[in-house]
Every structure is written in C-alpha cells, then in structure tokens.
Amino acid sequence: MDANATTPLLPEVFEAMRPYWMESYGNASSIHQDGQRARQAVDAAREQLAEFLGCREAEVVFNSGGTEGDNTALCGLLAPGDHLITTAIEHEAILRTAERLTTRGVEVSFIAPEPSGLIASEAVRAALRPNTKLISVMLANNETGVLQPVEEVGKIAADAGAYFHIDAVQGAGKVRLDVTRFGCHLLSISAHKMHGPKGVGALYVRRGTPVEPLLVGGKHERRRRAGTENVPGIVGLGKAVELARTALDNGTLTRLAALRDRLEQGILAITGTRVHGTAPRVANTTNIGFEQVEGEALVIALDLKGVALSGGSACSSGSTEPSHVLMAMGLDKTEARASLRFSLLRTASEADVDAVLGVLPEAVAQLRAISPAVAGTAQ
C-alpha cells in the first residue's frame, strides 16, 4: 500500500535490462561494436520515451531521476532577479531547491492549495510579476494524488511569456502525458515510480529552452547532462514506459481505481475517518485521516501485520514534522499527524484490499484505546 514511495520491477522490465549488465555492457559513447550495441539500446529507449511524452526524441534527456530533473529545471533556468512561481504542496525536490535559490537572489512565490488539495489556476495568474521567468506545478500530488490543472497553468505561462515546468513523477504511468497539450517546456519523470529501476529518470526539455546543465563534463545527452549513460537503467525506463502505455490503454487503471475506491469505502466505514484531497485524483491514491490515532503508531502497527504504507512522502520519512501538504490544505498538526497515505501498486488485487481491511479496524481500535496515554506521554 505504499506504491507512491516506490514500486517493484515488473518481470518484463528486469528481463529487458538483464543483457546490459553483463553481455552488452559497453559504454554507449564508444565507437566499437560493444559500445554501439549499448548506443542502440539507449536510442531505442529514447524513442519509447518520446512516444510516451508526445515529444521529439532529441527533447528527452536521461538522468538519475525526479530530483535531478527538478533541480535541473529550476537551477538551469533561474538567475538572480528572476521570479519563480511554484506551490506549497510540491515535492521537497522542488521546495528545497526553491528555498536555496532564494539565497541566490531569486524571488519565489509559493501558492497555497484550496482545501480540496487543488491549486487554483487563477491563484497562479495572480502571482505573476513582470520578472516571472518560470512556473513549476506538479501534475499529481504524491501525498493526496490530486491532479493539478497543468493545462490551464500552461496557458497562463504562455500568455505571460514564462517557462513552465511540470514535476510529473507521481503522474507518469497513471495519467496520459502529452507535453504539447500541457504546454510545458520541461517535465520530470522517474522510473521507479512506475515499476522501473531506481536511479534513472528523464527530463523533457522543449527544443530551444535555454537550460544550463546541472552536471558538466563529457558531451553526453547532447551536452545537457554529463556522465556515462546508465544503459541498463535507461533500457529499464524505456520498457517501464512501454508497459505503462499499455496499462493506460487496456483498462488497468480503471480496475485500479475501483480497487482504491473499495479500499477507501472500507476504511471510511471505521468511525472518525475522512479523506483528504477531494478533487480528481490519480487512480491508485487515497489519503485518510484517523481521529484519535497517531499516524506513525498506526504505520508501525500495520507493518507488524504485513501492511506497508506511509504518512506521506518517503523522502520525509523519519521527520517529526507533520505533512507540509496537509498543513497547506488547512489541517492542523494533530490532524496531519493522524493521516496516512494508501497507494496501490499497478499489480494490486482484491486480495490485497481484503488483507488491509481485515487488519486495519482492529489496529485503529487498539491505538484509540490507549490514545489518552499516548497523548499524555507526548505532552
């Protein structure tokens, strides 16, 4: 129940990657046959990514994942005196980068969401300034699953003459991506969120967008990202997006949404529970608050019963601070700490949902029975 943290490799992805660790291990920049076999594999994956994103192959830059893509988009475009518009519910890869840029003379506006978890496009428009150079809004929130109005924001950016970046890490593989329809100049994805390998991703860079590379060195990726290509990872990413396209076409996500709704309805049958994020969401995610329950204690209790989930972003795991996303939506600290994210794998089954619903009510009841003692200890 923690697919938004990461996903396992699908067998087809593993098999596609296997030859490029041992047999076809060449450097894709070498001109001999071993190198050229690796280059052909990278080029084939780039073609798969271009079809997945709806862009030219030359606009796909392979990298280490979503964090690098987000950092490149912001740091590669913004200079002292520029203005960035982003949101208060972005992933830390955007928020921490934006905060660092403020120390370097970049002005930043953080747009708060509505209580539903949705960023109002008019709030983005209202934040525009004459020096606004970049707008960065995520496609799907990693904690609530709420889909943001990226097409509307893309039009706002175009009207203002600003660049537009989308963090699509949680949306990729769950909604159909089309960079032309979105109107974005840059878009970040990561393989491990859609049953691909960890440590590899891609950044779409629209032709003509003047992004300075984050990493410099060799001439890799048309001088846009130095470093020897991770050929097995890139092949795995290509296969993962191929399978994601199939899932978008064959009804898999409709089945997944039905499972998510069944899980959600079963949880809401427990008294003192409610859903956070009521706007349209990706098919696999629900965020639910449990009154009189400490979320971390419930995570531990369920883990002991074989159920893995989280209180929010895995990148913030271990933090004593409540979810910045839920706080931005208007929840207080107690409510935010009492909330958990359930996110289903694409391979989830009815048996998985039944397993969760079979142990969750008892775990909640047990924690509520001792909640006064827990509260007294916390004080």
Image (spheres, rainbow, N blue to C red):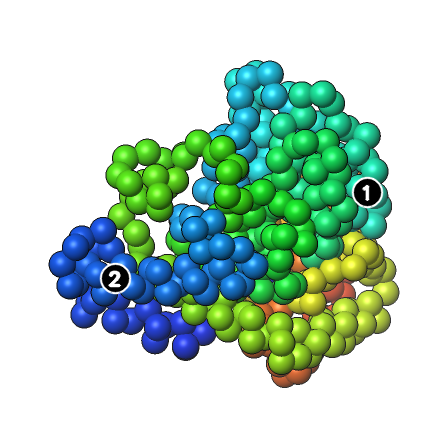
The circle on residue 38 is: 2
User: Which of the 4 quarters of the picture holds residue 283?
Assistant: bottom right
- For numbered disc 1, what is the local secondary structure? loop
Residue sitting at x 81%, y 72%: 265
Nearest the viewer among 217 and 279 is 217
**Amino acid type of the residue that numbered disc 1 sits on in the rendered structure:** Ala
- For the residue carrying disc 1, how many other residues have a C-alpha within 10 Å: few (<14), some (14-19), or many (20+)? some
Residue sitting at x 65%, y 24%: 83
Instruction: Locate residue 34, reporting x and y percent.
Output: 16, 63
Residue sitting at x 19%, y 59%: 35
Residue behind mark 1: 120
- For the residue carrying disc 2, how many other residues have a C-alpha within 10 Å: few (<14), some (14-19), or many (20+)? many
- For numbered disc 2, what is the local secondary structure? helix
Nearest the viewer among 82 and 223 is 223
**Amino acid type of the residue that numbered disc 2 sits on in the rendered structure:** Ala
Instruction: Locate residue 281, reporting x and y percent.
Output: 74, 60
